[in-house]
Image: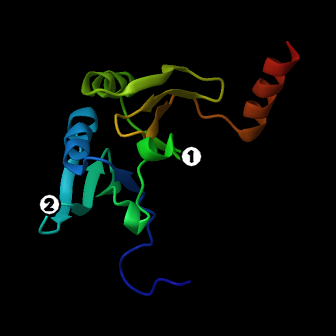
Amino acid sequence: MSNSGTTPPALVPRLVVAGADAAIAFYERAFGARVVERFADGSGHVVHAALELHGAVISLTEQRPEWQNVSPTALGGSAVILNLTVDDVDAVGRALERAGAEVVFPIADQFYGHREGRFRDPFGHLWIITRVIESLTPEQIEARMRGMTES
């Protein structure tokens, strides 16, 4: 599929949440997100909101099962992990915790050259917050993995 327009193709994850306005407030507190657009119907149901955070864009919509929009909390978890690269992983991790996220894996330096941790936001979405601290080749990563399993 070609893109003949001036806008480059993009993949924007759409998060389904129970409590869209609360989720927007959480992402503002946790990530310093900025609302790019927000559309709600006459009942106040947020049909679409776009947020910019750390150079990335996500969208979200309010849970509505009859539209097949079901949140991770209603499903019992999320099969998707969002990975966000940031400049200061520790500061963002602290902001996530203060805003109400649960630590799944604490922030630590990883063998593959990243400093990162995993969090579950109050709406059931999983996030890996990461910063590259060492640029490694695939061969170096594989050698480190072999070293971990051989000991």
Q: Which residue bears the numbered disc 2?
A: 44
The quarter of the picture where residue 59 lies is: bottom left
Would residue 138 appear left or right of 112 to someone viewing this image?
right
Residue 3 in picture, x, y percent from top left: 47, 83
The picture places residue 32, in percent across and down from the top left corner, at 22, 39
Labels 2 and 1: the sequence-earlier one? 2
Which residue is farthest front?
66
The residue indicated by pointer 1 is 79
When asked about the image quadrant of residue 74, the answer is top left
Q: Nearer the viewer, mark 2 or mark 1?
A: 2
In front of the other: 141 or 108 = 108
Question: Which numbered disc covers residue 15?
Answer: none
Name the residue at the left extreme.
Answer: 42
Which SS class for mark 1? loop
**What residue is drawn where x is 34% and y is 55%?**
63
Q: Amino acid at mark 2?
A: Gly
Measured as percent of width and height from the top left, residue 69 is found at: 40, 60
Q: How is the image coloured?
A: rainbow
Task: Decide: is 16 above or below 109.
Answer: below
Badge 2: how crowded within 10 Å, few (<14), some, or many (20+)? Answer: few
Is disc 2 in contact with disc 1, using a CB cutoff of under 8 Å?
no
Residue that appears at 73% across and 32% down: 141
Q: Is residue 3 above or below residue 64?
A: below
Residue 11 as seen in the image, left or right of residue 39: right
Q: Nearer the viewer, residue 53 or 121?
A: 121
Quadrant containing the N terminus in the rendered view: bottom right
Q: Amino acid at mark 1?
A: Ala
Quarter of the image for the C terminus: give it.
top right
Query: Helix or strand or loop: what does disc 2 sit on?
Result: loop
Between the residue at mark 2 and the residue at mark 1, the CA separation in whole angstroms equals: 28 Å
